[in-house]
Amino acid sequence: MCGICGVIYRDPRRRAEPEVLSKMASTLRHRGPDGEGVKAMGPVGLGHRRLSVIDLSEAGTQPMPNEDESIWIVYNGETYNYQSLRRELTDNHQFRSQTDTEAILHLYEERGFMCVNDLNGMFAIAIVDLNKNQVVLARDPFGIKPLYYSLDGHRLVFGSELKSLVASGEVAREIDHDALNDYFDFQWIPAPRTIYKGVRKLEPAHVLTLDIKTWEAKYTRYWKPEYRPHDGRAFESWQSDVSDALEASVQQQLVSDVALGSFLSGGIDSSLVSLFASRGSSKKLASFTVDFEDETCSERVAAEKIGQQIQSDAHFETLHHESIDRLSELVHYYDEPFADSSLLPTTAVSAMARKHVTVALSGDGGDELFSGYKHHNLAAGVSRLDRVPATISKCMFGAVAGLAPGKSRFNVWGRRFALPPDSRRMSILRLPGAGCRTDLLAEDLRSSLDSRFWQIDRHRQELSGLPPVTQVQLFDLLFYLPNDMLVKVDRASMASSLEVRVPFLSRELADLAFQIPEEIRFQKGQEKRILRGIAAGHFGTEFAQRPKRGFAIPRRRWMTEAATPHMERTILSGPAVAEGVLDRRSVQRLFRDVRGRTSRFVIDRTEELFTLVAFHHWWQCHMSGAADSSKFTPVAA
């Protein structure tokens, strides 16, 4: 795991400066504390920060060239099948290291940029090919590893994090107002947008190729999840195949030259990953669990039982209300506004793990592949409305929304039910343009409501006509997973220089999941039917049938307690309000609503308060002159 960056100028007379490349790379040192490398080749420059995991010797230093130094690579990630690829390439290439990086480099020489199709892993890759005058940027199929870029008519700048692009001096901190609205809609900013104008995220499963001579850029999508149901097989047969595929994926991801452990939340997904990892590990597996004082959110008892059964070296830590105070520090690592409150326990478990291991396995991805979220059940129920003509549902539920108070559940669900069927289902997780969130923004910064559905609109064609739950699952896989869940895990773990691997997110397992007919994969009222069946076989029915809790803080209690007059004064006197980004009266009203909520029919606004607090700290850190990377050290240091 590492951090990468670079700059390429169109004008061959311009020079990429080693000092600038080093400055860019130094902003990523938490991603790679074990070394730095830069390479300037006229108008082309590459930078790298290294976290040593495979081949710890100097032979693994990047940027890395091929034999005649005509092709250079910087790479962030892990390729789990690199040893088999290496064996295929040894006849034609001279290897100087034992790294997966060098295998990718020579694979590119043999097969071009579509070699990414042969990689089983997580990655963000930049290759400069001086023979073809070509730059290649590539990102893994699910978006596990981040890659930002800024391309105009004069230069290409890229990096693992936004701060490295800003450090180049080529990218300004100019706010993209559409992205700002996205944040208050979703609590994060979906790809390809970023918070800064002119900077984009390379989307998962995409390759960007740039011809250095003609400056022609081309985007290629090399994979996408597709629903291709195979009928005629029994539930037990599918369950067996999923179990085998998951165990195989875990075994492949155990390759490491440093200590490796596993996150163990006490839920089904992480418990299965930890079980299979303990079977394949040559040493006693270290497991890491964060719990909460509030027993309604804590799964410590379940995690302890699983740890005992798999005989792991179990580590536990209890998270307290005071962890909210760490937001002011953690926003440095996120670069963009980000308000998934589970970033707090994810940061804590990563920091705890890093004291013992360099690599950890995670259970992320199981919910998206195997119908694990409550809103998948809701999608099945909402689909019954598909029989109602669209014009009737629009008028009927639109009227309900119009009559209901703006902060009530009736208003939000009335607006959702008034939408066309596809939009109705895909907005279950987040309803764009909900006034209770967007009125925090100053009025002149709010975008039109119609434009807020751009994410649903851009995926509508490939998802239309699918069974309702599968449609929402695939939307989660394309939208929610890469923009929220994987961002959270990457930034939280990299803040402690910890590499996190995600065994559920292999192409083989994803393709298998969407070969399973929906009526077998999903059962109304029971999330993750197949994974529960696997878990029952290993841990017993009582464990497998426990309700899903999720990895969430006791947000309602914590944020209600945090909604003090002091916090309100701090935000109202802060730069985001003073500079006209946030609406003062709306901020005051939010605090009043959180402190005074008495009815369950009124929307719980503590999620919005967390969104506001996170944004306040982000603006103060990144937009008010405080974003000095030299002040920050890895969280686990």
Image: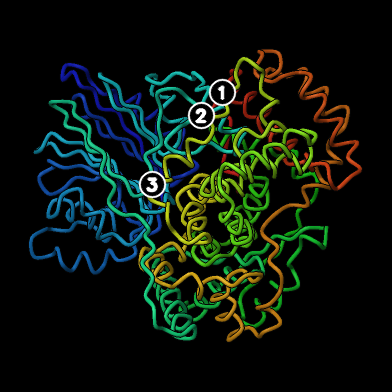
| Callout 3 amino acid | Gln
CB-based contact (under 8 Å), mark 2 and mark 1: yes
Q: Which mark is residue 447?
A: 1
**How far separated are the C-alphas under marks 2 and 1?**
7 Å
Label 2: which secondary element: helix
Q: Is residue 11 left or right of residue 434?
A: left
Nearest the eye: 419 or 26 = 419
Residue 165 sits in quarter: top left
- 63 up-or-down from 358: above or below: above
Find residue 424 and report its horizontal and vertical position in percent: 58, 47
| Callout 2 amino acid | Ser
- 319 up-or-down from 432: above or below: below
Label 1: which secondary element: loop
**How far separated are the C-alphas under marks 2 and 3?**
17 Å
Find residue 154 and report its horizontal and vertical position in percent: 25, 19
| Callout 1 amino acid | Ser
